[in-house]
Amino acid sequence: MDAIIWLVLAGLIAYFIVKKFYKPKYLKTLTQEEFIQGYRKAQLIDVREPREYDGGHILGARNIPMSQLRQRMNEIRKDQPVYLYCQSGARSRQAAQFLKKKRNVENISHLKGGFRKWTGKIKRK
Protein backbone atom coordinates (compact mmCIF):
# COMPACT_ATOMS: atom_id res chain seq x y z
CA MET A 1 0.00 0.00 0.00
CA ASP A 2 2.82 2.43 0.88
CA ALA A 3 4.46 1.80 -2.50
CA ILE A 4 1.26 2.79 -4.32
CA ILE A 5 1.00 6.04 -2.35
CA TRP A 6 4.65 6.87 -3.12
CA LEU A 7 4.15 6.12 -6.82
CA VAL A 8 1.06 8.35 -6.98
CA LEU A 9 2.87 11.12 -5.11
CA ALA A 10 5.93 10.86 -7.37
CA GLY A 11 3.68 10.92 -10.43
CA LEU A 12 1.89 14.06 -9.22
CA ILE A 13 5.16 15.83 -8.48
CA ALA A 14 6.54 14.90 -11.92
CA TYR A 15 3.33 16.11 -13.58
CA PHE A 16 3.49 19.53 -11.89
CA ILE A 17 7.21 19.95 -12.66
CA VAL A 18 6.68 19.13 -16.34
CA LYS A 19 3.62 21.41 -16.50
CA LYS A 20 5.57 24.31 -14.96
CA PHE A 21 8.53 24.09 -17.34
CA TYR A 22 6.92 22.71 -20.52
CA LYS A 23 6.81 25.28 -23.31
CA PRO A 24 4.12 24.57 -25.91
CA LYS A 25 5.24 24.91 -29.54
CA TYR A 26 2.38 27.27 -30.42
CA LEU A 27 3.30 29.85 -27.77
CA LYS A 28 6.33 32.15 -27.92
CA THR A 29 7.50 33.60 -24.61
CA LEU A 30 8.99 37.03 -25.26
CA THR A 31 11.21 39.26 -23.16
CA GLN A 32 10.05 42.83 -22.72
CA GLU A 33 12.42 43.97 -25.49
CA GLU A 34 11.12 41.33 -27.92
CA PHE A 35 7.53 42.15 -26.91
CA ILE A 36 8.07 45.88 -27.59
CA GLN A 37 9.54 45.14 -31.03
CA GLY A 38 6.40 43.35 -32.22
CA TYR A 39 3.33 44.33 -30.25
CA ARG A 40 2.41 47.36 -32.38
CA LYS A 41 1.96 45.04 -35.38
CA ALA A 42 -0.14 42.57 -33.38
CA GLN A 43 -3.39 42.32 -31.46
CA LEU A 44 -2.28 43.32 -27.97
CA ILE A 45 -4.59 41.73 -25.41
CA ASP A 46 -4.57 42.10 -21.63
CA VAL A 47 -6.32 39.07 -20.15
CA ARG A 48 -6.47 40.47 -16.61
CA GLU A 49 -9.74 41.50 -15.00
CA PRO A 50 -11.07 45.05 -15.65
CA ARG A 51 -10.04 46.41 -12.24
CA GLU A 52 -6.45 45.24 -12.87
CA TYR A 53 -6.52 46.71 -16.40
CA ASP A 54 -7.89 50.04 -15.14
CA GLY A 55 -5.10 50.20 -12.54
CA GLY A 56 -2.54 50.29 -15.35
CA HIS A 57 -2.02 48.57 -18.70
CA ILE A 58 0.35 48.59 -21.65
CA LEU A 59 -0.45 51.46 -24.00
CA GLY A 60 -2.64 50.20 -26.85
CA ALA A 61 -3.79 47.01 -25.10
CA ARG A 62 -7.35 45.78 -25.38
CA ASN A 63 -8.89 44.19 -22.29
CA ILE A 64 -10.42 40.76 -22.88
CA PRO A 65 -10.36 39.17 -19.41
CA MET A 66 -9.72 35.46 -19.11
CA SER A 67 -13.15 35.17 -17.49
CA GLN A 68 -14.77 36.53 -20.70
CA LEU A 69 -12.53 34.88 -23.28
CA ARG A 70 -14.97 32.11 -24.19
CA GLN A 71 -17.74 34.63 -24.98
CA ARG A 72 -15.43 37.13 -26.72
CA MET A 73 -12.98 34.87 -28.60
CA ASN A 74 -14.43 35.92 -31.98
CA GLU A 75 -13.07 39.43 -31.37
CA ILE A 76 -9.59 37.99 -31.88
CA ARG A 77 -8.53 37.68 -35.51
CA LYS A 78 -6.79 34.47 -36.58
CA ASP A 79 -4.89 36.13 -39.44
CA GLN A 80 -2.86 38.50 -37.23
CA PRO A 81 -0.31 37.86 -34.49
CA VAL A 82 -1.72 37.83 -30.94
CA TYR A 83 0.33 39.25 -28.07
CA LEU A 84 -1.06 38.34 -24.65
CA TYR A 85 -0.16 39.39 -21.16
CA CYS A 86 -1.53 39.13 -17.64
CA GLN A 87 -0.08 39.95 -14.22
CA SER A 88 2.50 37.14 -14.05
CA GLY A 89 2.20 35.00 -17.20
CA ALA A 90 -0.04 32.19 -15.91
CA ARG A 91 -3.36 33.47 -17.30
CA SER A 92 -1.79 34.47 -20.61
CA ARG A 93 -0.47 30.90 -21.03
CA GLN A 94 -3.96 29.61 -20.24
CA ALA A 95 -5.51 32.08 -22.71
CA ALA A 96 -3.03 31.01 -25.40
CA GLN A 97 -3.92 27.36 -24.89
CA PHE A 98 -7.62 28.20 -25.15
CA LEU A 99 -7.18 30.32 -28.32
CA LYS A 100 -5.08 27.61 -29.99
CA LYS A 101 -7.59 24.87 -29.16
CA LYS A 102 -10.93 26.66 -29.64
CA ARG A 103 -10.12 29.39 -32.19
CA ASN A 104 -7.13 27.76 -33.95
CA VAL A 105 -5.00 30.90 -33.60
CA GLU A 106 -1.48 30.11 -34.84
CA ASN A 107 0.75 33.09 -34.05
CA ILE A 108 0.57 33.62 -30.26
CA SER A 109 3.14 35.27 -28.01
CA HIS A 110 3.07 36.28 -24.38
CA LEU A 111 5.09 38.54 -22.13
CA LYS A 112 7.65 36.75 -19.96
CA GLY A 113 6.95 37.56 -16.31
CA GLY A 114 3.76 39.43 -17.16
CA PHE A 115 2.77 43.01 -16.44
CA ARG A 116 4.43 43.03 -13.01
CA LYS A 117 7.83 42.89 -14.80
CA TRP A 118 6.86 45.56 -17.39
CA THR A 119 8.91 48.77 -17.23
CA GLY A 120 7.63 50.39 -20.44
CA LYS A 121 4.89 52.96 -20.94
CA ILE A 122 1.57 52.35 -19.27
CA LYS A 123 -1.84 53.98 -19.25
CA ARG A 124 -4.20 54.24 -16.28
CA LYS A 125 -7.96 54.80 -16.41
Image: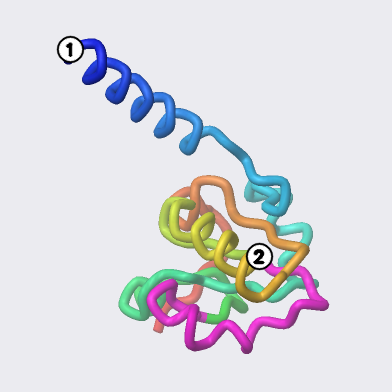
Mark 1–mark 2 Cα distance, whole angstroms, equals 41 Å
50 left or right of 100? left
8 left or right of 53? left
Q: Secondary structure at mark 1?
A: helix
Give the position of the N terminus as an image quadrant.
top left
Residue at 71% from the left image edge and 70% from the top image edge: 104
Residue extending farthest to the front is 1
Residue at 36% from the left image edge and 80% from the top image edge: 50
Q: Does the stretch in magenta take in 28?
A: no
Question: Quadrant of residue 51 in the image?
Answer: bottom left
Q: Assess disc 2: are there few (<14), some (14-19) or many (≥20) residues with their C-alpha within 10 Å of its C-alpha.
A: some
Residue 112: x and y in percent read 57, 47
Residue at 40% from the left image edge and 33% from the top image edge: 16
Residue at 49% from the left image edge and 80% from the top image edge: 70
Question: Of the residues tagged 1 and 2, which is closer to the observer?
Answer: 1
109 left or right of 79? left
Using the image, tell me which numbered label, if any, was put on residue 96.
Answer: none
The three-letter amino acid code for the residue at tag 1 is Asp
Magenta residues (range):
63-82
Eyeballing the image, is 93 above or below 113? below
Label 1: which residue?
Answer: 2
Q: Does the stretch in magenta take in 74?
A: yes
Eyeballing the image, is 109 above or below 45? above
Using the image, tell me which numbered label, if any, was put on residue 100.
Answer: 2
Residue 89: x and y in percent read 48, 52
Q: Earlier in the sequence, mark 1 or mark 2?
A: 1
Q: Secondary structure at mark 2?
A: helix
